Image (cartoon, helix red, strand yellow):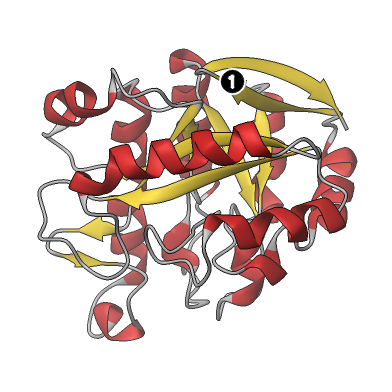
Amino acid sequence: MHSTYSDGRSSPEEYIGAAVDAGLSEIGFSEHLTLFRDPEEWNMNPENIQAYIDHLELLRKQTRKIKIKTGLEVDFFPGKEKEIGSFVENLPLDYIIGSVHYMGERTVDFGPEFYAGKSFDSLFESYFEIVIAAVESEIFDIIGHCDLIRIFGYRTAVNMEHLYRKLAKAMKKHDVVFEVNTNGRNRPLADFYPDRKFLSVFKEENIPVCVNSDAHMPSRVGQYFDEAYDLLRYTGYNEMAVFEKRIRKMIPF
């Protein structure tokens, strides 16, 4: 979930009631952190990280109805593995999500104009190579929206199963979790990340999964979770990953 510390529309407090009403037993905040770029409206100023951590710690002490976890969603940049790792390694976090938004100087999710005049198949392959590099960095506990490049609903001309399989094998080797991100339903794509027809690839490699709403407003906390869990059960999953102080455990759903 994202609050006003990054690109969310509400303060952390406002998400708690929505999460309790949704029947959730715990929630995790995961503000955007983008290093090596000037601060923008959608990502947290690194100078505010301690205030963010302190704010959630205070909420944790005040709240008895639900567990509150503190995380970050950190942008991955190839070649900057050492710098990213050094920045986050000593932060008191429960989990770190690694995400790829940038290809070069631009983000893939800002607008469809990024794709104009380009081969989507080539972009898709290049995007996956960056995601796989993020996995191989071993900085992150979870990889977020691993095929975000699908956001505007463009389709490849050829079957990309080999890329999902390559990604799953890297996740297995480096012990990284993937997420079913339900917020894709609110994008032009109108479906989850990753592509549901390739979920079986992750199951074949026994990659742990978590279900995340990627909520940017309280009304979307836990959105489409029932559908996501049904989809995962159909694929063969019956447990999901949760984190505390960056230690993973599996719980049934």
Pick the front one: 112 or 246: 246
* Image coords of residue 226 (percent x, y): 87, 54
Residue depicted at x 60% and y 23%: 243
Kind of residue indicated by mark 1: Glu
Residue 100 visible? The answer is yes
Closer-to-camera residue (16/236): 16
- Asked whether 48 or 143 is in front, the reply is 48
Would you identify the image quadrant in which residue 242 lies? top right
In this picture, residue 45 sits left or right of residue 214: left
129 on left or right of 173:
left
Q: Is residue 83 found left or right of 175 in the rendered image? A: left
Residue 98 visible in the current orientation? no
* Residue wearing tag 1: 244
- Kindly identify the residue that appears in the image at 55 percent across and 81 percent down: 188
| Up/down of 169 relative to 114, above or below | above
- Indicate the quadrant containing the C terminus: top left, top right, bottom left or bottom right: top right
Q: Position of residue 235 (x, y in %)?
A: 82, 39
Image location (x, y in percent) of residue 171: 49, 25
Please rate how many residues cluster around mark 1, counting C-alpha atoms within 10 Å: few if below 14, some from 14 to 19, many from 20: some
Find residue 93 and report its horizontal and vertical position in percent. Answer: 44, 26
